[in-house]
Amino acid sequence: VFGVNLGSWLVLEPWMLPQEWLDMGGQDCSDCSQCIRSEFAFVKAYPDTADQIFDEHWSTWFSQDDVDQLVRLGINTVRIPLGYWIIEDLVERDTEFYPRGGLQQLRRGLLQLKEAGIDAILDHHALPGVQSPNQMFTGNCTTNVQFYTPYNYRRALLWTAIMTVLSHLDPAFASVVSIEAVNEPIMDATQTPGYGDFQKRFVRTVRVVERALGIGSWSGQTQRLRRHWGIHARQEDPISALRTTITTDAYFVDDDNHFTGPNPAEAADGPQVYDNHLYYRQGVADANEEAYMHSICNLQRVPDDAALGNSPLVFGEWGLPTQFSATDEFLVKWADAQKLAYTQGAGWIFWNFKIERSKLAGNLSRQWSYFDGVDRGYLTVDPSQLHDPHVCDPYV
């Protein structure tokens, strides 16, 4: 996998396009919960115009020009961050505020990716109820984290079931190769009751839907589930039938084989891939070049995860940002060393494909944008190549 994230397309993070966000009508503040600094706050503030404003953003932030650039750079996979609200009937409109119309834009982008031969991962990036506090990527900057509840787990499973149906039946979704359960949940298990069971039910939801569609070898409930549904490829509202299925079918909701531990490998039912995110700017190593290189060149995450059964492992988010002011020369080494480490597993997906270039954004794109990283010579034009295959020799 040599990929990039399509961040800030269908889940907008204002820090990545600060001028456009202000031009749209958003605000800037140090605490994103205290101003119009998320999709939730924006739609709540502008209920009559938000859909049109976001549609313009969706049309321009990721376009055919970007797809063409991905092809030129040899990218074979994209990870597409999505909010639960892209399935509009899942939104409680009295209390939840998100833009409408994203599903048609997703279809448009997936068709363009399919024509280009680029695979897509549908990443459930922003979960119902919010999965992490005060994060723009959840769609709602708030400390009121409510994802880890039976009600919101069920909504997330319904989203999963619908995405599975679309991925197999809607021709626009032909490039989809994977659906990701949750982006960056809280890492403290004491704060995430039921999350282990949710992971297992996520996998079971995908597999039962597939088997009900005649995909896979197991067919124990296929006919019964088909009678529940009556879904076809272009149906845009399979929700009521799926809601009935998830509510009444014990295989979705009340599986007796509950998790006994936190290892997601226990959820496996057929092939699955594991996603690891690694940002050194968050304090992985001491803030200097030597410590960074020694750490990345001796990274043990791939073999350690493989020992737990969490393989194949993809590094689904990483980038070039550092805790210190990095020289151009170091960023060439830093890009090579990370690519070398991550290709010990199943590959990597860079965050992000692009960042706004503006006076307000300053130098932000230098270390966060894949397109800029290639233009500046930090990243090789051919993603499978390195500037220096021996970059780690002095550090191991």
Image (cartoon, rainbow, N blue to C red):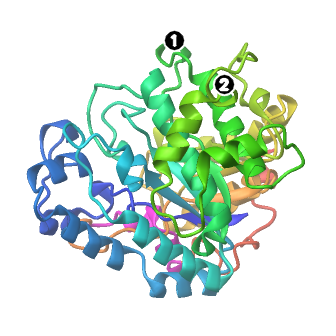
Task: Identify which residue is drawn at 51% across, 64% down.
Answer: 235
Identify the amino acid type marked 1: Thr
Q: Which mark is residue 190?
A: 1
Picture coordinates of residue 246, whole percent (x, y):
57, 34
Q: Residue 365 lies in magenta, yes or no?
A: yes
Give whichever of 354, 170 is nearer the camera: 170
Which element carries disc 1, helix, strand or loop?
helix
Task: Identify which residue is drawn at 33% across, 79% down.
Answer: 60
Q: Residue 38 lies in magenta, yes or no?
A: no
Q: Main structural element of the magenta stretch: helix, strand or loop?
A: helix
Please give left or right for residue 194 compared with residue 39 in the image. right
Q: Quadrant of the C terminus?
A: top right
Q: Is label 1 or label 2 in front?
A: 2
Image position of 101 with respect to 66: above or below: above
Which residue is at the far front? 227
* Label 1, residues with CA under 10 Å away: few <14, some 14-19, many ≥20: few
Give whichever of 163, 331 is nearer the camera: 163
Give whichever of 337, 213 is nearer the camera: 213
Picture coordinates of residue 191, whole percent (x, y):
47, 16
* Distance Cα–Cα, label 1 vs label 2: 26 Å
Picture coordinates of residue 169, whole percent (x, y):
65, 66
- Choose top left, top right, bottom left or bottom right for residue 286: top right
Please give left or right for residue 142 compared with residue 280 in the image. left
| Whether residue 21 can be seen here | yes
Q: Which mark is residue 250?
A: 2
Dot 1 or dot 2, earlier in sequence: 1
Which residues fall within the magenta stretch?
Answer: 362-376
Q: Which mark is residue 381?
A: none
* Label 2, residues with CA under 10 Å away: few <14, some 14-19, many ≥20: few
Task: Identify which residue is drawn at 68% across, 43% down.
Answer: 225
Identify the amino acid type marked 2: Ala
Which element carries disc 2, helix, strand or loop?
helix
